[in-house]
Image (tube, helix red, strand yellow):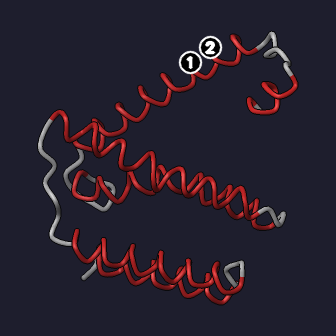
């Protein structure tokens, strides 16, 4: 949008400031609610919804809305939106959050970190192969990736 406006010498919308204010209010609301949720969860010691599974639960809280959007845009046959959304989360948001946390205190790497990195690399290469060869990820290949995630969940939570 910005590139098109610069090319056409157009001005920004009059409501841009109002949009930015609403964006800032929403971001602050998310910050407050997530902070409250994490503090509440740290006080719960027993059960699946507890401090023991904080990483899993917070990850799902951040990923599930994106997954629902991915399902919607997949259903409407707009894969470019899915790819850009997932790339933004995986390559920008998550490393940024981990990096900011590391500025405040050292980050302890869990035992499964190395196998998790290997799994991420393998799934990325699997996905890249299909994009390079076929230009898309076939449904059956997507099913394999989902099954792999199921194995990852089982090993991380129950094994």
> Dot 1 corresponds to which residue?
25
Q: Residue at x 78, y 25 (%)?
A: 6
Q: Determine which of the numbered discs, if any, sits on residue 21 in the image.
A: 2
Q: Is residue 20 above or below residue 147?
A: above
The residues bearing labels 2 and 1 have C-alpha atoms spaced at a distance of 6 Å
Q: Residue at x 62, y 13 (%)?
A: 21
Give how far across and how far down residue 143 sits, in percent. Answer: 60, 85
Q: Is residue 68 above or below residue 2?
A: below
One can see residue 157 in this view: no
Q: Residue at x 27, y 53 (%)?
A: 50
Residue 91 vs residue 63, the one in the foreground: 91
Count residues near mark 2 (Cα–Cα under 10 Å), then give few for <14, some for 14-19, many for 20+.
few
Query: Which SS class for mark 2?
Result: helix
Q: Residue at x 82, y 32 (%)?
A: 4
Q: Which quarter of the rendered picture does the C terminus lie within? A: bottom left
Query: Which SS class for mark 1?
Result: helix
Q: Determine which of the numbered discs, if any, sits on residue 86 in the image.
A: none
Q: Name the side, left or right, on which 93 lies relative to 143.
A: left
Disc 2 or disc 1, which is closer to the eye? Answer: 2
């Amino acid at each position: 949008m910005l590139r098109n406006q610069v090319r056409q010498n157009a001005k920004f919308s009059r409501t841009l400031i109002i949009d930015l204010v609403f964006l800032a209010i929403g971001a602050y609301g998310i910050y407050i609610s997530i902070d409250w949720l994490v503090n509440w969860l740290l006080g719960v010691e027993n059960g699946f919804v507890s401090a023991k599974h904080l990483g899993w639960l917070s990850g799902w809280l951040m990923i599930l809305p994106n997954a629902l959007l991915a399902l919607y845009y997949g259903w409407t046959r707009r894969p470019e939106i899915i790819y850009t959304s997932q790339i933004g989360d995986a390559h920008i948001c998550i490393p940024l959050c981990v990096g900011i946390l590391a500025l405040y205190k050292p980050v302890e790497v869990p035992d499964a970190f190395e196998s998790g990195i290997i799994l991420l690399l393998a799934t990325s290469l699997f996905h890249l192969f299909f994009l390079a060869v076929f230009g898309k990820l076939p449904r059956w290949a997507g099913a394999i990736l989902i099954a792999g995630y199921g194995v990852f969940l089982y090993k991380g939570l129950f094994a």
